[in-house]
Image (tube, helix red, strand yellow):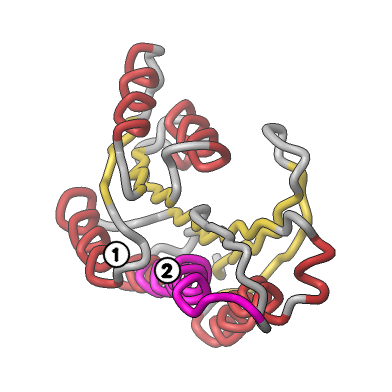
Amino acid sequence: MERWTGRVALVTGASVGIGAAVARALVQHGMKVVGCARSVDKIEKLAAECQSAGYPGTLIPYKCDLSNEEEILSMFSAIKTLHQGVDVCINNAGLARPEPLLSGKTEGWRTMIDVNVMAVSICTREAYQSMKERNIDDGHIININSVYLQDWWKQDLLLNFMIMTPRELLQPMRAFGVSKLKTWLTLSYMSSVPHLTYRLETYR
């Protein structure tokens, strides 16, 4: 982790759960971490805890509604201005609503797609562009998708779409210097809920 000291990571959904744990761990290893969420009260508290603990890195709270593209673009612009750009992007934020394909409400679908698909895609694009323009050849983009209630996503077309779409969108990036796209199922130490993770590795 020594090579990541002082470099910049963006963690979405950093206020609670896995996002907060990831943000803390990266700060503990010396990274500058921009932690974003719709509400930053808990991230501010976590930042103070990290500082009190004497961690070598820094946690920077950033308020951002990931269902709003303008706010996402504004966040990446601010990161570029203040910290040059993103070296690691962890798309952790996500949500689920009980809105099945045949009986769900449109607004619920729209919210899930905006956060779970569109926000992930926009953040991935912006992070990649940030790395590309600075000739970063060791950056990482990690997308964490919950597969809680696995029986649902095997049968529910909408949920299956939200899980598989990011992977399909990432495949063409091989033509732009992305050498590997790894997929694996992991169990968080914080929960028994498995998470499907995608990791991009650039050419060295």
Badge 1 marks a residue whose secondary structure is helix
**Residue 30 in sight here:** yes
Residue drawn at 17 percent across, 49 percent down: 82
Pointer 2 local density, CA inside 10 Å: few below 14, some 14–19, many at least 20: many
Q: In this view, does 125 lie to the left or right of 104?
A: left
Magenta part of the chain: 103-126
Point out which mark residue 188 bears. none
Q: Decide if residue 61 is on the left or right side of residue 141.
A: left
- Above or below for 25 versus 132: above
Q: Does the magenta stretch include residue 111?
A: yes
**Quick one: quadrant of the N terminus?**
top right
Horizontal and vertical percent position of residue 192? 77, 39
Residue to which mark 2 is pinned: 119
Residue appearing at x 51%, y 42% in the figure = 19
SS label for mark 2: helix
User: Mark 1 or mark 2, which has the lower sequence index?
Assistant: 1
| Residue tagged 1 | 72
Q: Is the magenta stretch mostly helix, strand or loop?
A: helix
